[in-house]
Image (cartoon, rainbow, N blue to C red):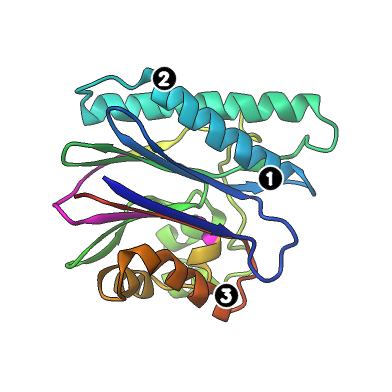
Amino acid sequence: MKAWGVTDTGLVRKENQDAYAVCQADTATVCVVCDGMGGVSGGKLASSIAVRTYSEELIRVLRPHMTPEQLREASSYAVSLANEAVRTRAATEEGCRNMGTTLVSAISYDGGVVVSNVGDSRAYHISPDGITRITRDHSLVENMVERGDITEEEARRHPNKNLITRALGPDENADCDGFICPLEKGDFVLLCSDGLVDTVTDQEMLYEVIHGGELDTCLDRLMEIAKSRGAADNVTVVLMQNN
């Protein structure tokens, strides 16, 4: 499976508190995006700890011919260890007591990917037939949308859109959601922090991936759109293609 990744501080923030990894293990491609929060240095530290711990622990337990269900269990295990690592560091380092991070990941298998998420970083399935969000945001506004209190478009502009209800670090048991996503040959999975979601629409993501031009420059084009609209937050995007 091919994979590309890019991250940028954006045009307003002084520090990039996002982190990502693209790992080619013997048995799978593993991608993860984290969006840190909490204090001047805490967010950057939390996201880097979570990305490193998740990737290392997952790759350590991967075995050949694991089923999608087994991969989902392995991912959940790696998420729990990443949460423990963030919490342990937060408890021992002054100034980082409130740090935390989102996490969204994808692990390839023969015929698709297994996706896990905690928080509001997202995963999308993109194909010539359209774009579908795989994950559900763990956020206040997502709950409001599900209750019918606001629309999806109103959620994009809501003043509390960045208030999440689940994260690694603050939660003792930061349970992740897990999804098994079958893919056709040539289909894509896009992982991103909310810095992309806040500035680029789903349809624009679809267009740039499927119709925008060379895949090697796709993420640069998405980043340029985000920056053209102010890029008030850090922006991170990872793209995977089932080839």
Q: Position of residue 171 (x, y in %)?
A: 61, 33
Q: Decide: few, some or many residues near mark 1? Use Cα within 10 Å; few <14, some 14-19, many ≥20.
A: many
Q: Position of residue 11 (x, y in %)?
A: 67, 71
**Residue situated furthest right in the rendering:** 94
Q: Position of residue 228 (x, y in %)?
A: 56, 80
Residue 188 shown in magenta? yes
Q: Which residue is mark 2?
A: 60
As drawn, 23 above or below 196: above
Asked whether the viewer can see residue 185, the reply is yes
Residue type at mark 1: give it: Lys
Question: Which residue does the image show at 17% across and 67% down from the upper left?
Answer: 129
Region rendered in magenta: 179-194
Label 3 vs 2, first from the N-terminus: 2
Residue type at mark 3: give it: Lys
Q: Decide: few, some or many residues near mark 2? Use Cα within 10 Å; few <14, some 14-19, many ≥20.
A: few
Residue type at mark 2: give it: Arg
Question: Which residue does the image show at 55% across and 32% down from the upper left?
Answer: 52
The quadrant holding residue 167 is top right
Label 3 – label 2 distance at C-alpha: 37 Å
